[in-house]
Amino acid sequence: MIKYIQKQEYESKTKTFTKERVEHVTFNFTLENQVHRDGHYFNDKFLNLKMKSMVFEDSVFEECYFEDITSTNTFFRNCTFIASLFYNTDLFKYRFVNSKLVNSTFLHNKEGCMLDFSDDNNAYMIYFVSFLGSLAVLPGNIVSALLMDKIGRLRMLAGSSVISCVSCFFLMFGSNESGMIALLCLFGGISIASWNALDVLTVELYPSDKRTTAFGFLNALCKLAAVLGISIFQSFVGVTKAAPILLAAGALAAGSFLATKLPETRGQVLQ
């Protein structure tokens, strides 16, 4: 969801240039988040620069020189290159979609996998969000540990699932990156209590001779459900935020209802 918001915000800042004619110009600065259509570039030089999220469509490059180019998410669609030279670039064939190369030469292409962590989000932000998510579940872990025996496993499981279901709807109001991170941390801090109660119930519901097998089987089902959930939610995120949020809320509501059908194990002697 956060990546979806970041992508929307980034695309909203895209600059579009149409039918521009550029001659005898040297580009030696970063080109980022631009779309160029029906352009004509004659005897231009692109030297020692980075191209990030650049798209050239139906453009003509005549006698242009590209040297020491590093690109990320950059494509040339339906373009024509005439007598152009590419030296020490990572502009490989897959970046030229339905493009024509007439008397153009590629020399000393960059080799290996070019990783660029500056695109979309840097490594610091990724780890920082993961840290906030881990920190958010700490209060929920403490509260669930203190109240597990007092209110019972079933009440904690069902109650936490219901509150998590309600908190899901607040995710629809996360219109920016910081707001969505705060809401996800809130959701994680609430829902962790239900997971803790479920772990305790999984151990206490089965006798000792079947406990290990049952715990492993249920964990395997959880992993499978997680993979399916990620695949399904990812396909819906690009369409609308409401679909994955409603699916998550529905799953939590169903889980809270099914939790009431389980036997209470509080105060019972384990077999």
Image (tube, helix red, strand yellow):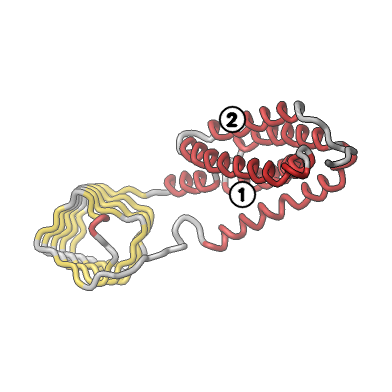
How many residues crowd around disc 1 within 10 Å: few (fewer than 14), some, or many (20 or more)?
Answer: few
Residue drawn at x 19%, y 58% as measured from the top left: 41
**Residue type indicated by callout 1:** Ser
Percent position of residue 188, x then y: 69, 45
Closer to us: 233 or 72? 233
Count all numbered tags in the image, as a single digit.
Answer: 2
Residue occupied by mark 1 = 178
Closer to us: 253 or 58? 253
Is residue 190 among the parts visible in the rendering?
Answer: no
How many residues crowd around disc 2 within 10 Å: few (fewer than 14), some, or many (20 or more)?
Answer: some
Q: Secondary structure at mark 2?
A: helix
**Labels 1, 2: front one:** 2
- Asked which quadrant contains residue 22, the reply is bottom left
**Residue type indicated by callout 2:** Leu
Residue occupied by mark 2 = 246
Q: Is 34 on the left-hand or right-hand side of 136?
A: left
Q: Secondary structure at mark 1?
A: helix
- Asked which quadrant contains residue 60, the reply is bottom left
Image quadrant holding the C terminus, namely top right
Residue drawn at x 67%, y 55% as measured from the top left: 132
Task: State whether residue 68 is above or below residue 150.
Answer: below
Task: State whether residue 136 is above or below residue 260.
Answer: below
Percent position of residue 196, x then y: 75, 44
Task: State whether residue 211 is above or below residue 22.
Answer: above
